[in-house]
Image: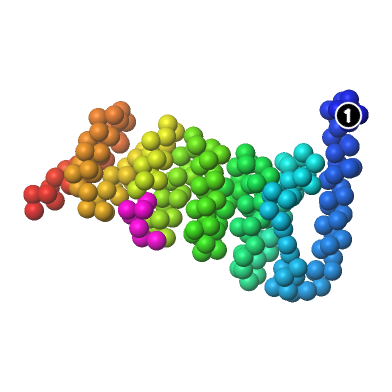
Amino acid sequence: MIFEKFPPRTKKVVLVIGVVLPLFFTQAYLQKPLNSYPVSQSESFLYLPSGEYLEPLALGYNQVLGDLLWIQAVAYFGSHYMGDKDYRWLYHILTLIIDLDPRFDFPYFFGGIVLSIEADQKDRANAILARGMEAYPEKWEYPFYIGFNHYYHEGNSAAAIPFIEKAAALPKAPAFVKSLVGTLYLKTGKKETALGFFRKMYKNTSDVLMREKIATKIELILSEGKK
């Protein structure tokens, strides 16, 4: 193809002129009549197809189109955060971005936190985070946030345990995540499991301050067992 023969700088110029600018002006053209309607009415016109159908239209520039949609997602959230707090389209926009560019990690964090805390869409938040776990299995944050949603928002310690365990087992997980596993064991009545976990954690921890905290937890568990 002729395009492949262009130097990198020329390719960027062609990309901006041939793909990005047309998308920008098309969006501006479509947005103009929608701005004459209230937000709730204008969104009845909004329809974004799944990534399966949109990807061929990206002409191989999935990341560029994903970035444009990411800007729209942030603007969409901001406008509703300052207004009616109706985020019904946010999940769909974020999943579309992820379909186009699964290695773009901001939508995972944004969706996992905002959909659960601000939009009260915990199941959808967890679905976004689960996709983050698939794309980045080495990141402890995604399973941790799923576990946090179960524990904090649903009050379901048992459902949280497998995800916090998974997060704690990853190499870069901070100490508080590992400690939380033992705390959840206690909350679900698994005192012996919690005791064994904290003892193992104490043995494998070199940080003096952390060892003191773990020792205090162990003593507390043992003292409660004598009552």
Left or right of residue 124, residue 16 in this image = right
Label 1: how many Cα within 10 Å (few below 14, some 14–19, many 20+): few
Does 54 appear above or below 120?
A: above
User: Dot 1 corresponds to which residue?
Assistant: 1
Q: Which residues are magenta?
A: 154-160
Does 47 appear above or below 223?
A: below
Foreground of the two, 1 or 11: 1
Which residue is depicted at the point 84% across and 62% down?
Answer: 30
Foreground of the two, 43 or 113: 43
Which residue is depicted at the point 61% across and 57% down?
Answer: 91
Foreground of the two, 23 or 203: 23
The kind of residue tagged 1 is: Met
Residue 49 placement: quadrant? bottom right
Left or right of residue 164, residue 101 in this image = right
Image spot of residue 72 (x, y percent):
72, 55
Does 50 appear above or below 81?
A: above
Q: In which quadrant of the rendered image does the N terminus lie?
A: top right
Which residue is depicted at the point 77% across and 45% down?
Answer: 56
**Looking at the image, can residue 109 be seen?**
no
Image spot of residue 114 (x, y percent):
55, 57
Does 108 appear above or below 80?
A: above
Which residue is depicted at the point 50% across and 37% down?
Answer: 137
Image spot of residue 148 (x, y percent):
42, 52
Is residue 107 part of the magenta span, yes or no? Answer: no
**Looking at the image, can residue 154 be seen?**
yes
Disc 1, SS: loop
Image spot of residue 227 (x, y percent):
8, 53
